[in-house]
């Protein structure tokens, strides 16, 4: 399959075809962009620039394993757009990471920053590895060596990383330290999502999950759903998924099923999230939680519920299972959980979709707050952070809903239109160098 063309006179870019197009995730991101471009009647010259990431770096990351052997991992950093300011995006450690996936994620970050009106372009990075099989020492050496390898294209005004799947506050602390050692002064603004003790922002760890739940609450209000009568199913119990579960339960929603990469569990009466968190934090597998029953993984997403929250991987809602979803709201906490084919099926149903680029934008929003605080050396309180997050999330949510209603568009296309349009206008106004 080749890139979708925006018009007959707009051939797909050969650079993007050869470098990224073998990735289904990248093709999916391009397909979305092409659809939005035709809705917005965007200038094909701008669209062809938006289809290809601005800068991509592939690096070998050799590390010494605890056994004394050397192992070489492959790392990536892709900056989709540098038009709106520094590029911004997470760093992912996962066996499935490849250039196309990282490129797609970087493109989605551009639209997300556009929707939230943040002064950033999109970026993403990753290392193809399974962090669960690496010791703490190996992870530290991997992170520091990767930072060294991408040093020439990162910087607080150039490209700022944050945690994503398989990375956390500690990963960001190592990047901060490595970068600071290289430049010769402490530079906390090189990363966001770092420990609070090192200039991290209070509430950043919870921000993505909180933002997801602000969106769900808006959808509840619009649909007249009372949280106490609602149920939720969540795929993923990491940074994002666990906070979503916790915040939903605090609002009275019954979380009836949860899954992670090792298995899925169900309890019709609701799973006590605090107890589950303690159980998992003690080193147990979620699937072994004694206060719920095991269910097959492929049943998790089709479990009947009010709100379904994929908070793990991309492309989990496909043409095969989309027609079997039994939820009223699909809140996409993960990036890219729904394929375009599945999306077409969902558009024929009354499922209320809160698309990823809006739903999980709380993370980059509070990352922006953290970057601003570090640049100014002036820290905010958690109440200030949460209130400002709520304000920006609700503003974006309402803009998306207004556009969706006015133009009779699905929420996803409305959200993407807002994001793409902002970046396209900036590119148009800045012009083409030289
Ligand atoms: P994480 O590494 O903290 O957690 C990932 C969770 O997904 C884990 O519970 C893991 O077991 C589960 N998982 C992995 N493979 C799975 C599988 N095959 N089936 C079911 N579950 C599986 O990652 P995270 O930071 O919570 O990120 C989750 C998603 O949210 C990703 O798509 C990420 O890009 C997106 N996201 C994260 C942030 C953030 O601030 N961390 C911001 C925006 C979007």
Image: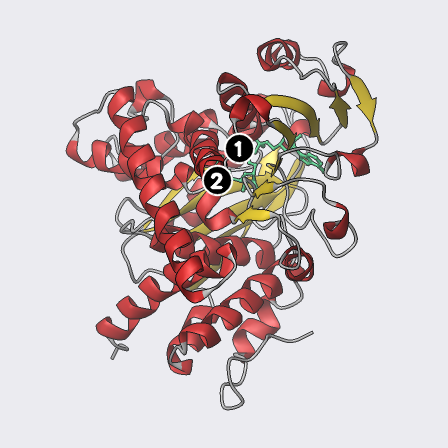
Kindly report which numbered mark, 2 or 1, lies closer to the viewer in this rendering. Answer: 1
Where's residue 222, x and y in %? 46, 41
**In the displayed image of the protein, which residue is found farthest to the bottom?**
9
The mark that comes first in sequence, 2 or 1, is 2
Where's residue 83, x and y in %? 30, 62
SS at circle 2: helix
Where's residue 263, x and y in %? 77, 27
Where's residue 56, x and y in %? 47, 60
| Image quarter of residue 425 | bottom left
Q: Is residue 154 visible?
A: no
| Image quarter of residue 393 | top left
Q: In screen coordinates, is 140 left or right of 425? A: right
Write down the residue under mark 1: 225
Q: Quadrant of ligand 1?
A: top right
- How crowded pointer 1 is (Cα within 10 Å; few <14, some 14-19, many 20+) is rated as some
Residue 219 circle label? 2
Q: In screen coordinates, is 272 left or right of 296? A: left
Q: Are marks 2 and 1 in contact (CB under 8 Å)?
A: yes
SS at circle 1: loop
Residue at 58% in and 33% down: 166
Q: Quadrant of the N terminus?
A: bottom right
Q: Nearer the viewer, residue 154 or 241?
A: 241
- Please determine whether, in this image, residue 299 is positioned above or below residue 403: above
Q: Quadrant of the C terminus?
A: bottom left
Residue at 53% in and 18% down: 252
Task: Tell me the CA gap for discs 2 and 1.
Answer: 8 Å
Q: Nearer the viewer, residue 58 or 431?
A: 431
Q: How many marks?
A: 2
| Image quarter of residue 270 | top right
Q: Nearer the viewer, residue 52 or 309?
A: 309
Residue at 28% in and 28% down: 387
């Amino acid at each position: 399959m080749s890139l979708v063309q925006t018009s007959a006179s707009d051939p797909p870019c050969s650079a993007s075809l050869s470098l990224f197009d073998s990735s289904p995730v990248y093709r999916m991101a391009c397909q979305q962009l092409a659809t939005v471009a035709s809705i917005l009647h965007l200038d094909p010259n701008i669209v062809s620039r938006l289809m290809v990431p601005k800068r991509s770096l592939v690096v070998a990351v050799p590390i010494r394993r605890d056994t004394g052997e050397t192992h070489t991992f492959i790392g990536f950093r892709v900056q989709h757009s540098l038009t709106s300011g520094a590029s911004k995006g997470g760093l992912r450690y996962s066996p499935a990471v490849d250039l196309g996936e990282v490129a797609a994620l970087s493109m989605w970050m551009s639209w997300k920053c556009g929707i939230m009106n943040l002064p950033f372009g999109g970026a993403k990075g990753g290392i193809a590895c399974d962090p669960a099989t690496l010791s703490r020492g190996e992870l530290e050496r991997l992170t520091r060596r990767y930072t060294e390898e991408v040093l020439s294209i990162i910087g607080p005004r150039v490209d700022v990383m944050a945690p994503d799947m398989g990375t956390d506050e500690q990963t960001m602390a190592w990047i901060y330290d490595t970068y600071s050692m290289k430049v010769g002064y402490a530079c906390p603004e090189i990363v966001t999502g770092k420990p609070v003790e090192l200039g991290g922002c209070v509430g950043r760890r919870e921000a993505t999950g909180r933002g997801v739940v602000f969106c769900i609450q808006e959808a509840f209000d619009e649909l007249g759903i009372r949280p106490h009568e609602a149920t939720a199913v969540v795929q993923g119990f990491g940074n994002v998924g666990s906070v979503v579960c916790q915040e939903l339960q605090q609002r009275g929603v019954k979380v009836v099923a949860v899954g992670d990469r090792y298995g899925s569990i169900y309890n019709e009466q609701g799973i006590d999230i605090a107890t589950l968190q303690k159980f998992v934090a003690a080193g147990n597998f979620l699937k072994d939680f004694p206060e719920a029953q095991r269910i097959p993984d492929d049943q998790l997403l089709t479990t009947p519920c009010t709100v379904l929250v994929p908070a793990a991987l991309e492309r989990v809602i496909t043409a095969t299972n989309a027609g079997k979803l039994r939820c009223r709201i699909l809140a996409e906490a993960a990036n890219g959980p729904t394929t375009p084919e599945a999306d077409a099926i969902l558009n024929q149903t009354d499922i209320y979709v809160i698309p990823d680029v809006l739903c999980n934008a709380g993370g980059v929003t509070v990352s922006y707050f953290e970057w601003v605080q570090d640049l100014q050396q002036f820290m905010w309180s958690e109440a200030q952070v949460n209130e400002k997050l709520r304000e920006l999330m609700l503003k974006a949510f309402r803009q998306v809903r207004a556009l969706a209603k006015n133009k009779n568009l699905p929420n996803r296309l409305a959200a993407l239109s807002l994001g793409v349009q902002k970046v396209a206008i900036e590119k148009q106004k800045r012009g083409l160098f030289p």
